[in-house]
């Protein structure tokens, strides 16, 4: 890092572990941390991520990539831990649901144990799924959720709820410095084209001139946060004062129906793709929108990228990735 960069640096350089660091959010986060001058160790088992997301970083001396599954203990020396490792799209987390729960629970126990030995701050990438199919709208952190404990989304929803429990028990029992972020739907470059997520699926389908698969009648809503905004929120949360443990909602409060999203994608790609209505998967939440007041007040954070701008950049990424 140049002396100039050091002078501008908000916090002294650290050794930072990013579990799941070659995934969609992890790869963007790792890049930002490297750009800020830190050493970054990415640990990933590549179950739902791609080495392509970080392959260009391998020549960077401050970057290290390690294949490891967080359900097994990890022995490394770092100053900070971003714990993101877990399949996060319904298609991936439902493929091997037992392993998903293990990743959430055993993975968190292992990373919390590591953080405890090191006395290192650890941030959990939790999820809006802890609210289940919410009856309270928009969702604030004080809402306890409406989660089916035995459904097809439970491995992830209950897994992440248990991970949050573990984080707060390590905080109470061991005074571990923890941070819990509840991440709402996030999109942008580096998403996998086959992850089944609504944004990536619609863009890929539109670019290929295929019908856009709308589940149910498309009136269910989501709030879509562009990746750069999400990374900014995660870093702010990690560097917030010790008393800020969270949970903190991170997401874009602008709410759209799935059909509205389909329309925007069709207009941006300029495709004649029709809409193909498919059955709604069980336990698919009807409405989702974050209340981000806590993030605004504690972190001075709110998303700045409108859906239209973020979608344009994401379409451009997929156009090149798919070479269409
Ligand atoms: N969805 C859809 N078509 C698709 C993929 C998803 O209509 O091809 C819907 C899905 O049923 C859900 C919303 O889009 O209501 C968001 O789905 P996603 O898998 O992106 O995220 P999550 O359900 O975890 O919020």
Image: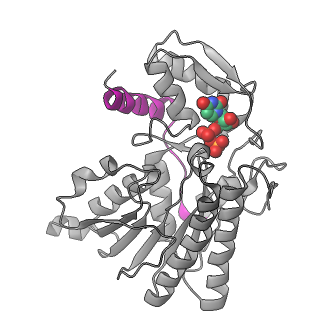
Residue 225 sits above or below residue 101 on the image: above
The residue sitting at the top extreme is: 272
Q: Quadrant of ligand 1?
A: top right
Is residue 130 or residue 105 the one in the foreground?
A: 105
- Evaluate whether residue 253 shows in this view: no
State the residue at coordinates (36%, 33%): 317
> Residue at image x 50%, y 57%?
233
Identify the residue shown where x is 75% and y is 40%.
287
Query: Which image quarter is the C terminus in?
Result: top left
Does 108 lie within the magenta span? no
Left or right: 193 as drawn, with respect to 298: left
Image point (45%, 63%), residue name: 235
- The spot of residue 244 in percent (x, y) is 59, 74
When the figure is inspected, residue 62 is found, relative to residue 120, above or below; the finding is above
Residue 150 percent across, percent down from the top left: 80, 56
Q: Is residue 230 visible?
A: yes
Task: Indicate the quadrant where residue 125 lies.
Answer: bottom right
Task: State the extent of the magenta-drawn residues as a range.
Answer: 298-322
Q: Quadrant of residue 102?
A: bottom right
Magenta stretch containing residue 312, yes or no? yes
Q: Is residue 290 left or right of residue 79?
A: right
Residue sitting nearer the eye, 155 or 189: 155
Compared to residue 200, the image places residue 22 above or below, namely below
89 or 175: which is nearer to us? 89
Q: Position of residue 170 (x, y in %)?
A: 62, 84
What secondary structure predominates along the stretch shown in magenta? helix
Q: How is the image coloured?
A: one colour
């Amino acid at each position: 890092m140049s002396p100039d960069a050091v002078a501008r640096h908000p916090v002294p350089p650290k050794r930072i572990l990013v579990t799941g660091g070659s995934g969609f959010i992890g790869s963007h986060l790792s890049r930002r941390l490297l750009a800020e001058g830190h050493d970054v160790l990415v640990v990933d088992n590549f179950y739902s991520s791609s080495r392509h997301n970080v392959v260009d970083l391998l020549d960077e001396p401050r970057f290290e990539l390690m294949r490891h599954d967080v359900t097994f203990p990890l022995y490394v020396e770092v100053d900070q831990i971003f714990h993101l490792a877990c399949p996060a799209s319904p298609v991936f987390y439902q493929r091997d649901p037992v392993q998903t729960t293990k990743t959430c629970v055993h993975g968190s126990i292992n990373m919390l144990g590591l953080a405890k030995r090191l006395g290192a701050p650890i941030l959990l990438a939790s999820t809006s799924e802890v609210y289940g199919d919410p009856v309270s709208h928009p969702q604030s952190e004080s809402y306890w959720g409406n989660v089916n404990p035995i459904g097809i989304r439970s491995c992830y929803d209950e897994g992440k709820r248990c991970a949050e429990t573990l984080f707060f028990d390590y905080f109470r029992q061991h005074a571990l410095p923890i941070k819990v972020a509840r991440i709402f739907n996030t999109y942008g470059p580096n998403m996998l084209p086959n992850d089944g997520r609504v944004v990536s699926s619609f863009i890929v389908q539109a670019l290929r001139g295929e019908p856009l698969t709308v589940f149910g009648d498309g009136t269910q809503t989501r709030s879509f946060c562009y990746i750069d905004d999400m990374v900014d929120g995660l870093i702010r949360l990690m560097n917030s004062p010790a008393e800020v443990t969270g949970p903190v909602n991170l997401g874009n409060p602008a709410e759209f129906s799935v059909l509205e999203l389909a329309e925007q994608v069709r207009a941006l790609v300029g495709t004649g793709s029709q809409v193909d209505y498919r059955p709604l998967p069980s336990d698919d939440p009807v409405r989702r929108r974050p209340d981000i007041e806590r993030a605004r007040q504690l972190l001075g954070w709110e998303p700045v990228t409108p859906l239209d701008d973020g979608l344009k950049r994401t379409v451009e990424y997929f156009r090149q990735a798919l070479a269409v």
